[in-house]
Image: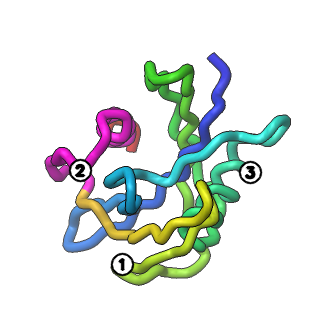
């Protein structure tokens, strides 16, 4: 299985609990930062690039968390834990150029919280993977 999707994972600790960086896509509900790995691009580079493109945040790869077969359109996700270079706000909006441009509303999801129907099943599966590998 060759990894073809990069998923940078950003977490923080608040009040003793881990929180995961997530965002609301205006057309597709709650998501994690994720994108296609370009030809010959290392996973680590793709994770840093996707994080910047979709959130405006800069970081460095702290560790590799593993790969996950999403069972969706041949997507094999690679996860890297990212350490941010600067502490972000509790929430913000970032204009992303993907799909002709969208405003993504970022927020921190308590890692152990229940996931409602605003989450696509694909991202619910990814979050289960992350919970098991952090």
Q: In what element is the residue under mark 2?
A: loop
User: Residue 84: x, y in percent?
Assistant: 56, 70
Figure quadrant of residue 25: bottom left
SS type, badge 3 = helix
Q: Residues within 10 Å of mark 2 (few under 14, many from 20)?
A: few
Write down the residue under mark 1. Answer: 91
Residue position for label 2? 118
User: Which residue in the structure is indicated by mark 3?
Assistant: 45
What residue appears at the point 64 percent right and 28 percent down from the top-left corner? 3
Which residues lie in the magenta part? 111-131
- Whole-angstrom CA distance, mark 3 to mark 1, is 25 Å
Is 112 colored magenta in this rendering?
Answer: yes
x then y, percent, for residue 74? 56, 20
Circles 1, 2 touching at the beta carbon (< 8 Å): no
Residue at 44%, 77% in the rendered image: 93
Q: Alpha carbon of mark 1 to alpha carbon of mark 2: how far?
A: 18 Å
Closer to the chain start, of discs 2 and 3, is 3
Residue 59 is situated, as x and y percent measured from the top left of the image, at 62, 67
Whether residue 32 is situated above or below residue 83 in the rendered picture: above
Point out residue 131 in the picture as x, y percentages from the top left corner.
Answer: 31, 41
Q: Are marks 2 and 3 in contact (CB under 8 Å)?
A: no
Query: Which badge, 1 or 2, comes first in the chain's sequence?
Result: 1
Q: Which label sits in the foreground, 1 or 2?
A: 2
What crowding class fits label 1: few (fewer than 14 Cα within 10 Å), some (14-19), or many (20 or more)? few
Q: Secondary structure at mark 1?
A: loop
The residue most toward the front is: 100
**Taking 46 as reference, is 115 left or right?**
left
Whether residue 113 sits left or right of residue 25 in the image: it is: left
């Amino acid at each position: 299985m060759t990894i073809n999707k990069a998923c940078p994972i950003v977490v923080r600790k608040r009040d003793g609990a881990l929180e995961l960086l997530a965002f609301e896509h205006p057309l597709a509900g709650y998501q994690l930062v994720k994108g296609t790995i370009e030809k010959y691009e290392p996973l680590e580079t793709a994770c840093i690039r996707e994080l910047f493109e979709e959130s405006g945040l800069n970081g460095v790869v702290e560790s590799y968390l593993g790969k996950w077969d999403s069972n969706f359109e041949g997507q094999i996700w690679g996860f890297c834990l990212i350490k941010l270079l600067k502490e972000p706000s509790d929430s913000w909006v970032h204009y992303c150029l993907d799909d002709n441009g969208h405003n993504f509303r970022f927020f921190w999801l308590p890692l152990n919280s229940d996931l409602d129907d605003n989450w696509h099943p694909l991202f619910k599966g990814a979050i289960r993977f992350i919970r098991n590998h952090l």
